[in-house]
Amino acid sequence: MIINDEGYIINLCRHGEKSLILTILTKEHGKMVGYVKNCLNKKSLGVYQQGNQIRVEAYARVEENMWNFHIELIQANAANFITDPKKLAVLSSFCALCKDTMPESQNVENLYLCVENFFNFINEDNWLTHYCYFEFYLMSFLGISLDLEKCAVTGSYDNLKYVSPKSGKAVCEEIGFPYRQQLYKYPQFILDKNYHPQQEEMKNLLEMTGFFLHKNFFRTHYLKFPTNRATLLESLDLE
């Protein structure tokens, strides 16, 4: 079996002195794990870095075997992160979430656009916005459904301001205001497809997505929440 695809490197693990076990997130085949033989040398040092966009030819004798990868570099994205501590922290969180949440060989087509936008716009002023969209739609991909259409208490479609951490449902301002310290802020900028939100809006969004990812995926699957994601807001220091 031979597969040709493109994607992003999300994890690397040494295998012996010169080889790697590589995890990549691909466009058409989702997460793939494979072996790259004798790849660690001076010539290819810049190829095998987290975040790099690559073209992969994957080969396996039978479906149950680990893939053997042949890798070609498309874009050296790692250079866009390495000199910026905040961007590097976000890349580490992104890679950890992809590695730990996504099943192997499952199509991620709907989510992949968010992944591409995250890397393609990393040098824009609103680069963090695209990571926020990734986490929000990652929840949907994982089956973590938020009911944001109407207020869970009144049924009103107007003035939605909060999200309940217990139910994942929207709450209008008149009902939620007395309990605002226990509720998450409504992610209006995501629903409006606004790519230039305020920093506080992104902070609120990441607080909410982090909570639901932890509660509704990692905890239910008895997995440890990635440290790189758990400390992300501290690294970003958003006002």
Image: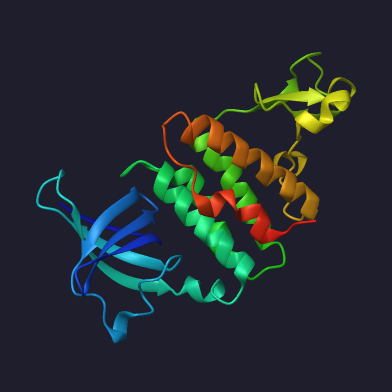
Q: Horizontal placement of 161 versus 9: left or right?
A: right
Please state which of residues 167 and 225 is positioned toward the viewer in this rendering: 225
The image quadrant where one finds the C terminus is: bottom right
Please state which of residues 107 and 128 is positioned toward the viewer in this rendering: 128
Residue at the far left in the pictured view: 61
Q: Say which residue appears at 44% left-offset and 49% top-offset.
A: 98
- In the image, residue 183 above or below residue 118: above
Q: Is residue 115 visible?
A: no
- In the image, residue 80 above or below residue 148: below
How is the structure coloured here?
Answer: rainbow
Q: Quadrant of residue 187?
A: top right
Q: Horizontal placement of 116 versus 221: left or right?
A: right
Q: Say which residue appears at 86% left-offset and 28% top-offset.
A: 159
Percent position (x, y) of residue 210? 60, 42
Q: Say which residue appears at 62% left-offset and 48% top-offset.
A: 133
Percent position (x, y) of residue 167? 65, 21
Percent position (x, y) of residue 146? 63, 28
Q: Is residue 147 visible?
A: yes
Q: How many numbered marks appear?
A: 0
Please state which of residues 202 and 190 is positioned toward the viewer in this rendering: 202
- In the image, residue 9 above or below residue 29: below
Q: Say which residue appears at 48% left-offset and 32% top-offset.
A: 219
Residue at the far bottom in the pictured view: 42
Q: Quadrant of residue 83?
A: bottom right
Q: Horizontal placement of 185 versus 108: left or right?
A: right
Percent position (x, y) of residue 107? 38, 42
